Structures are given as C-alpha cells and as structure tokens.
Amino acid sequence: MNSKALEVIKARRSFYDLDKNVDIAKEDIGDYIKEVVHNCPSSYNGQSQRAVVLFGDDHDYLWGKIVMETLRKKVNDEEDFKKTEKKINGFKNAFGTVLIFEDQASNRELKEKYPNYADNVDPWSEQNSGIVTLALWISLRDIGLGANLQHYNPIIDKEVKEKWNINDSWTLKSQMVFGNILSHPAEKKKKPIDERVIIK
C-alpha cells in the first residue's frame, strides 16, 4: 500500500551527524513547529504540552554551557570527559533544539475538572508528550531535517528555567536536537513484526 505518511515514518531516524547548514529560515521552522504542536491531539483536549525552540546563541548556550558544564562537574576524570565533550559538541553543532515540556498546572486543572479520571491524567500526559515528540520528529524529517532526542533532564532543569524564564509549572521532558543531515545512521535490527502485532 502506497502511503506518504509511512514513508516519512520510515525516514525518521536518530540522526546524530548534523550541522547548521540549513536553508530554511528559522522563523519558518518556528512557525512550522507551532503548527505541529497545535494540531496534536491530547486527552480531554488538555493541551498540556509545551515547547521552547532554541536557535543560534541560545541553542549553543544550552549545549556548550549548560549541558557541558553540568556534565563536567559530574565526570571527575578529564580523559573520560573527552568522550562526553565530543558527544555534546555534536549536539551543539546542530541547527536548533526543541525543549519539550509538560505543564503540570494544566494537568492539575484537568484533574479538578474530571475527578473520576484524576489518576489517569499523569499517564495520559506522558502519552500526550510522546505524541507531540514523535509528531515533531517526523515533521522535521518531512522538511528535510534530521533530529535526535536527548534526556538531560532533570540535571539541567534549574538552569534552563532560569536562562529562558520558563514557567515553574512546566516540567522538562526531553530535548530534540535538529539540523542538516551530514550522514545517515546504520540500519537497526528489528524484531519480527508478527511477534509485536497480532491481526485477528
């Protein structure tokens, strides 16, 4: 069956070899990301997902200063740190980062509005965050960009919130790095799909 959506899903990979040589204006990418997030579904239309898009000096500061220096304090051996430094510089070399958050104030409101489902709101929130994350990943790939997903939270949360004046109720979930693709990753071994999907 021919499907554009399936082709884009297949094209989505974890691209780590990225640079800043992107010929799409950052304003256009920003507007595009807004549209993606705006059109993602959420449980009971809670819309608790939040995103902060970093370009230029802000992107470089996240990786070159906040993440790099936070990890430097945790790795005592300078020789060991060289591997970490190379990895983080790889993220810094990319074009931008989407910081993906969940607004806990929004989730609290949902719990109050639907008390019978209050215990489900947090798991739903994680699912909603996953929906937004995958939608962004696929959508960035569809416009020719590569991305990878990082999780340096919670060790960077405080500095991130202070640097970009982030609302206290927003919880950082992940960091999506994106940019121009320099090389493609090797194929990954997949489990037989019939062991994972059963058709009756």
Image (tube, grey):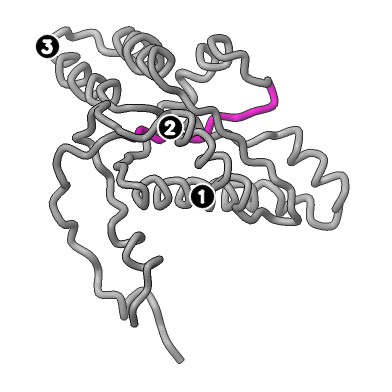
Q: Are marks 3 and 1 in contact (CB under 8 Å)?
A: no
Disc 2 from disc 1: Cα separation: 12 Å
Q: Residue at x 74, y 41 (%)?
A: 107
Inspect the image, locate mark 3, and give the three-letter code of the amino acid beneath it: Glu
Q: Position of residue 6 (x, y in %)?
A: 36, 68
Q: Position of residue 70 (x, y in %)?
A: 37, 12
Disc 2 from disc 3: Cα separation: 26 Å
Q: For residue 79, which numbered disc appears in the image? A: 3
Over which residues does the magenta segment extend? Answer: 168-178
Badge 2 or badge 1: first in the primary sequence: 1
Q: Position of residue 178 (x, y in %)?
A: 34, 35
Q: Residue at x 26, y 13 (%)?
A: 75
Q: Is residue 8 above or below residue 82?
A: below
Please indicate whether residue 138 sits to the left or right of residue 107 in the image: left
Q: For residue 175, which numbered disc appears in the image? A: 2
Please indicate whether residue 160 sits to the left or right of residue 64 in the image: right
Q: Residue at x 50, y 33 (%)?
A: 30
Inspect the image, locate mark 2, and give the three-letter code of the amino acid beneath it: Gln
Disc 3 from disc 1: Cα separation: 36 Å
Label 3 SS:
helix
Count every numbered label the image shows and give the total.
3
Label 2 SS:
strand
Q: Which residue is mark 1?
A: 130
The main secondary structure of the magenta stretch is strand
Q: Position of residue 108 (x, y in %)?
A: 78, 39
Badge 3 or badge 1: first in the primary sequence: 3
* 169 magenta-colored: yes
Q: Residue at x 35, y 60 (%)?
A: 9
